Amino acid sequence: MTESEGKCKKKMEQQKKGRGMLVFTGTAAVVAVAANIAFAAIKRHLDNNAKKQKDLAGSDVRVNLSPSEILNLADQIIAKSIKVHNSVASIPLNKVTYANVISPLAELQAEQFPLIHSCVFPKMVSPREDVREASTEAEQRIDAHLHMCSKREDVYLVVKAFAARGDWMNAETKRFVQILVRDFERNGLNLTASKREELQRLRALIDELSLRYIENLNDHSAFLLFNEAELCGLPPEFLKGLDKSENGQLKISLKSHHVTAVLEFCKAGTTRRMVLGAYGNRCGEVNRSILESLVQQRHKYARLLGYSCYAEYAVDVRMTKTPSKVFEFLKSMSTSLTELAMKELDILKDLKRKEEGELPFGTEDLLYYVKRAEEQNYDLDFGEIKQYLPISLVLSGIFKIVQDLFGLRFEEIAGADVWHCDVRVFSVLDLGSNELLGYCYLDLFSREGKYGHTCVVALQNSALRISGSRQIPIALLISQCQKGADSSPGLLRFSEVVGLFHEFGHVVQQICNRASFARISGLLVDPDFVEIPAKLLENWCFESFSLKLISGFHQDITKPINDDLCKSIKRWRTSLSAIKLKQEILYCLFDQIIHSADNIDIQELFKNLHPEVMLGLPALEGTNPASCIPQSVIGCEAACYSSMWSEVFAADIFASKFCNDDSNQHVGMQFRNKVLAPGRSKDSIEVLSDFLGREPSIQAYVESKTNNIL
């Protein structure tokens, strides 16, 4: 046991002892009466808590497995999976039924979902290196097996035979079976053997090219040298952390954190231009050639599967359905924002004239003058705001907001089995009926060896088991908050608060799902939809009511953020947002175009598209689009628009349903039951349209931006 583990164990033992201690005062007679009442209350509390712990222990999620237990469990998962798939595959095509084909596969997915995650999630959170290593190995074994299962033609033919019968029990079953068939066919199982072999060859080539592209960017270690005068405006603590050359010059690497700092703070325009130019030409011709080849191979891959281009293949399983819908969305957004973006650009150009004279305004100036405009127009000191955001208060505020909106009550389970003493476990109950809906693990504080980003992991999905019982969802929220020194409360940056609200949107989404099949449940929804609940909940970070609820000065929590600061935070949210969105639209359009047509000269495309979208601003000479748009190869190719899509429709939901009453539980319960509960059992556009009473629109989002010109 490490010293850290020993401290954790001691802390947990002290907490357990402390929960059972009561101090009685007063006369003997009062003590006697009070003791009876107190002991009865303690017994009820302990019985209730013991029941919660028993219920949690009865879930299929397993924590604190040893390395050998993780690897053994992985082997058991694989063995059971092979057995079930073999059994299903053995059914004659003329004897397929729901009971002998679909039900066994659905039950296997529901049963194995939490077991697989029991093997995999320790690599993200375990304080033990040997456990993390075993978890990584288990994930590799399981992934290889699942990949093999996804290409089993014998299972596909049986499922396809059932689907062809059209013998649906209900609409949800139909959708589940259609997704099973679709998953198989997107792996080429409806193709001839030779075409399937070619598909696999292309997939391997695409993976190899993608890896080379990413490695080139990650390994790029170039830097630029500057003296202090050329870096004027950068924070002193940033300059102190820079490496120096032999002659004392400061090294600015071409990594994003250095580049962003220079572009936001450096007063020297020539320095900003040099840094952005070098950053935009990383890996030069090498990565541009790789990107061109990648796009060609993706088109070939999609066409083998029957699509006209890769973009059509990528969006077919998304809310947008077609590339033309994506183009329509992006162009409507761009056109709607043009007038406001022009006004914002004029403001930035005027600031540059005042500071640097009549030098032309370029893309290297955008971040710097956006920052200056915000400093001049908003009296916001985020260091001061942090003093009002102790994590305990923020967390209790989030619980209250989620309770008031969605009728969810979070109750902490004392003494639950966890992997680190900082981890807390909550049962989530329906506020009205007290029905247990799910569980939530919170692992909020950073520590060595822990996954470095904030996210939610679905540990167990909602599903209707073959026994007739409902498997309840379980969520794990991982964050990187810093603990306070000694006994002082940990304080959060405002950006961390927004991040927590976002992730709690995913927790609510996971817990409120009531789909009958694990495959279409929880966070396994339409990729264009999955971020909408999280983006929606972010809105409460900018409303005065909720800002006051989650804030309190750390030395006197009765003093929340004042009204003027609340208003400034809300106005700051949309400051100079149109010009920023234009830049995002530029990248999304570039991504969609190259994946929608053949033989595109990506250099020429970017050169022409940049001034067209960015109000006449040209791309820096020599910019290599393959360097500045890495999204094209890291998992969201032809789908870069999706983040903006989610944010736009979340804004529509908030403005039309919640904005006039941001604690409206009637609307919140409608959202929970109509939008979150179905999961992927219904079409996402239909679900949103039913909730809104119309199709989703960009109008509310655009209006939220245009109402705040500096």
Image: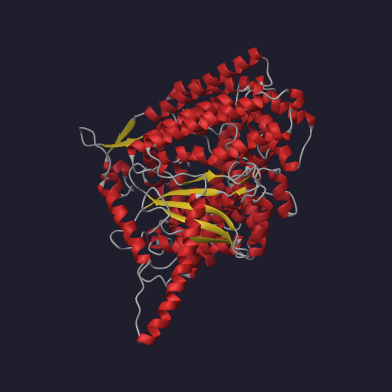
Q: Is residue 323 above or below residue 347?
A: above
23 left or right, relative to 674? left
Pick whichever, 592 or 586, lies toward us: 592
Across and down, in percent, residue 441 comes to 47, 51
Query: How is the structure coloured here?
Result: secondary structure
Across and down, in percent, residue 203 comes to 56, 21
| Residue 209 in sight | yes
Rendering quarter of residue 599: top right
> Residue at position x 49%, y 54% from top?
54
Pick whichever, 16 or 377, lies toward us: 16
> Residue at position x 76%, y 40% from top?
169
Locate the N terminus and report the quarter of the image it occupies.
top left
> Residue at position x 71%, y 38% from top?
175
568 left or right, relative to 598? left
Pick whichever, 163 or 253, lies toward us: 163
Across and down, in percent, residue 389 comes to 41, 62
Q: Is residue 43 above or below residue 609?
A: below
Pick whichever, 560 or 575, lies toward us: 560
| Residue 489 in sight | no
122 left or right, relative to 307? left
Q: Is residue 117 above or below residue 237?
A: above
561 left or right, relative to 536? left
Question: Residue reaching furthest top?
Answer: 194
Across and down, in percent, residue 41 comes to 46, 72
Rendering quarter of residue 278: top left
